[in-house]
Image (spheres, rainbow, N blue to C red):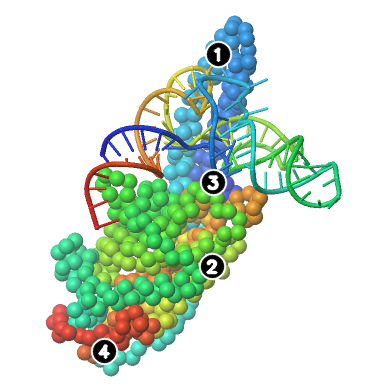
Amino acid sequence: MLSIQFIRENADRVRRDMLLRNADVNIDRILQLDEQRRALLQQVEGLRAKRNAASKAIGASKEPGEREVRIAEMRLVGDEIRRLEEKLRSLDDELQQRLYEVPNIVDESVPRGPDETSNVVVETVGQPRQFDFVPRPHWELGVMVDGLDIERGARMSGSRFYVLKGPLARLQRALIQFMLDEHVAAGFTEAYVPYMMSEASLLASGQLPKFRDNLYRDAEEDFYFIPTAEVALVNYHRDEIIPAGRLPERFVAHTPCFRREKMSAGRDVRGIKRGHQFEKVEMFVYCEPEASSAELDGLVARAKHIASALELPHRVVALCTGDLGFNAAKTFDLEVWAPGQAEWLEVSSASNCLDFQARRANIRYRPAPDAPPRHPHMLNASGLALPRTVIAVMENYQQPDGSIEVPHVLRRYLGTDRIAAVNPAPAVRD
RNA sequence: GGAGGGGUCGCAUAGUGGUCUAGUGCGCCCGCCUGCUAAGCGGGUUCCGGGGUAACUCGGUCGAGGGUUCGAAUCCCUCCCCCUCCGCCA
């Protein structure tokens, strides 16, 4: 979240950024609550100081008469304190609630625009492959190599679930292994983390309270299923002061991700592009504020490295102000080309959240052993999201007979250079 | 799931209603003393918030939140976490 001090001192900038995001946030109400709160706080603290002094005098006093008088006096002061505290608490609650729902500020370098049509392609790498046949979408190829079973997934769990088996289950696992190995080799620390987290953790990472509708949760216990490993990695240092000399810290974790996808109902219903459960390799960085801009570039470079190593045509897109996520001040998406549907697939989103999550999660670090604590900057980036990378590999490497060539870097993981087609092409609908 | 024990300053501990402004030891920092080092002596050492240009000052903070009281680390209630043993279990 933004600190109330920051909002107070930069009210115009915050108002502007909320407009740029199309965020419906009442900054004036927040400022009003802040002012009322501080005025009331001064009253309460003044009375408490008075009571503290009197109580000390009562403790030291030996004259029963004097004690009685002062106790009676303080009884009234106590009542007044209680009355004002109640008002203070309700002001605090409303202020806190509203602050939790204010999104991050916008980095000055972010292109302006109301929605994704204003996003800017900043770099394109590789040429889409020229096919001398009509490339198939991944859901047809999946059937042909006997690796994808949508119907059984739906029978087990309903729509937006699927089973990967045989060569495609192995392809996905090989990709995960490859990505983790590459990032670890680049100095990232691999982490295995809980997939279910408490409400407090989701609040700290910014998923709650605003995005409750997109989360799965246990009905009886305080468990939410993580929608991304980012949630776990934000909370790794929650309520800590990181000692001097530890930053930057760079993590990589592979986890499943669970999303209700209520917000995108009806979109991308075919195949494995958008499911309720999917695998993702996630990178995460804690760093000093001065370093976060360079770290963001580094994360984008890592995501690009994976796409390049897999020889997938890809591009980097700078999200515009209206398309930024709640936590992010600046975001680059990485998209890979999927010839089967002739579209760009988002496989990574790299964001600099500045100190926004550090405040929510109460994470600080010491720049030097005796220096006062500061909030670190925190960044996250997929590296990469699996189902869409699987789609891109399948569709880019497909052969006329429905078999799939294995990218060079994956061959040592899969022990083969080709995934054979064993079924005929499914009947083409309409 | 059952039974028991426990959460106090970086670490270890003391503290069962009022000089607790939370003591002591260790660690760390500053200073003094001292050929050097060690020891010794003196001082400092949580974090958050309010007010103030500042020196400074006020409030809160003993796992969390409520409550009792003029006054709570201390008493009461609810919850969380950790440890030990039993049960169950991949």
Query: Mark 2 sits on what residue?
Result: A295
Gap between marks 3 and 2, in whole Å? 27 Å
Residue occupying the point 28% across, 76% down: A170
Query: Mark 4 sits on what residue?
Result: A399
Q: Position of residue A310 (x, y in %)?
A: 39, 81
Which picture quadrant has residue A180? Answer: bottom left
Query: Mark 1 sits on what residue?
Result: A71
Q: Earlier in the sequence, mark 3 or mark 2?
A: 3
Query: Mark 3 sits on what residue?
Result: A4
Numbered circles on residues, count:
4
Q: Position of residue B14 (x, y in %)?
A: 55, 29
Residue occupying the point 57% across, 26% down: A48
**Mark 3: which secondary structure?**
helix
Gap between marks 3 and 1, in whole Å? 38 Å
In this rendered view, identify the residue nearer to me: A159 or B32: B32
Give the farthest residue toward the bottom: A132
Q: Look at discs 3 and 4 and give the one toward the viewer.
A: 4
Gap between marks 1 and 2, in whole Å? 60 Å
Q: Earlier in the sequence, mark 1 or mark 2?
A: 1
Q: Earlier in the sequence, mark 4 or mark 2?
A: 2
In this rendered view, identify the residue nearer to me: A228 or A18: A228
Residue occupying the point 50% across, 70% down: A187
Residue A323 numbered tag: none
Q: Earlier in the sequence, mark 3 or mark 1?
A: 3
Three-letter amino acid code at disc 1? Answer: Ile
Three-letter amino acid code at disc 4? Answer: Gln
Three-letter amino acid code at disc 3? Answer: Ile
